[in-house]
Image (cartoon, helix red, strand yellow):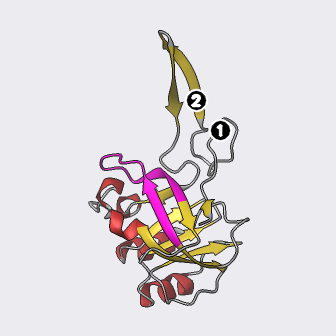
Amino acid sequence: MKIYDVSVPLYPGMPVYPGDPEFEREEIPAGDAKISRLGLSTHTGTHIDAPSHYLDGASGIDEIPLERLIGRVEVSEFPDFSGTVPAVFFKSAKAFPLDLAKRLCDAEIRVVGCDSDSVGDTAVHTLLLKHNIAIIENLALDSVPCGEYSMIALPLKIRFADAAPARVVLLDSLIE
C-alpha cells in the first residue's frame, strides 16, 4: 500500500493567506525536555474549514463528523470530477466559480479539497458550507496521480473553531 501525505509542512516563513498571521514556533525551556510554543491561524497550511467559518451559529471544526473525513476520494485535475465518490480533491486548482460549487452540491459531494489557498470567494464558501461540504485547502497534490484513493483527513479538535490545521493522507488501496 502506498501512502501519500498531502499535507503541507508548517515552518516559519511559509506562505500564508494574505492578512493571516505568520506561522511561529518558539522553543521554550522545559527542564530536560524540549517543548515549543506555536503561533498560527486556524487556516495555516493544510486545513479544514468548519461551517462556522462563514455561517453564524453553525458548527465548529470539533463537530464535523469524522465519518465524513475518512473514506473514498477522487483526485482530479481542476475543474473536472466524476461525482462517483463522496469526495474530490482538485489539482491545479483556481478559485472555484459559483457554478462549480453548485455542481458539487448537486453531486452530493461531502468533502472538497484543493491545492490552492482558498476554494473561492464568500459566495462559494457559503454555498459549500450550507450544504455541509467540508472544505480542505492547501493540499500538496503534485506527486499524486489522478484517480481514486482512501482519504483520512483529521483536523485538530479545537472546540468551536472556524477551522483547524489537519494531517491529510491518501492510501492507494480503498477503504469501503
Residue situated in front as seen by the camera: 1 or 98: 1
Residue at the disc numbered 1: 11
Q: Is residue 55 above or below residue 40?
A: below
Q: Is residue 84 above or below residue 132?
A: below
Lower sequence index among marks 1 and 2: 1
Does residue 166 show up magenta in the picture? Answer: yes
- 111 relative to 15 in the view: left or right: left
Residue situated in front as seen by the camera: 51 or 167: 167
Where residue 87 sits: x, y (%)?
Answer: 48, 77
Mark 2 crowd level (few <14, some 14–19, many ≥20, 10 Å Cα): some
Badge 1 amino acid: Tyr
Task: Kindly state the secondary structure of the residue where label 2 is placed.
Answer: strand
Where residue 109 sits: x, y (%)?
Answer: 44, 81
- The magenta-colored residue range is 150-168
Where residue 122 sits: x, y (%)?
Answer: 49, 68
Task: Name which residue lies at 41% across and 76% down.
Answer: 110
User: Residue 120: in sight, yes or no?
Assistant: no
Residue 25's disc number: 2
Where residue 131 sits: x, y (%)?
Answer: 36, 78
**Disc 1 vs disc 2: Cβ atoms closer than 8 Å?**
yes
- 60 relative to 166 in the view: left or right: left
Q: Residue furthest left?
A: 57
How far apart are the alpha carbons under marks 1 and 2? Answer: 8 Å
Mark 1 crowd level (few <14, some 14–19, many ≥20, 10 Å Cα): few
Badge 2 amino acid: Arg
* Prevailing SS of the magenta stretch: strand
Task: Name which residue lies at 59% across and 71% down.
Answer: 172
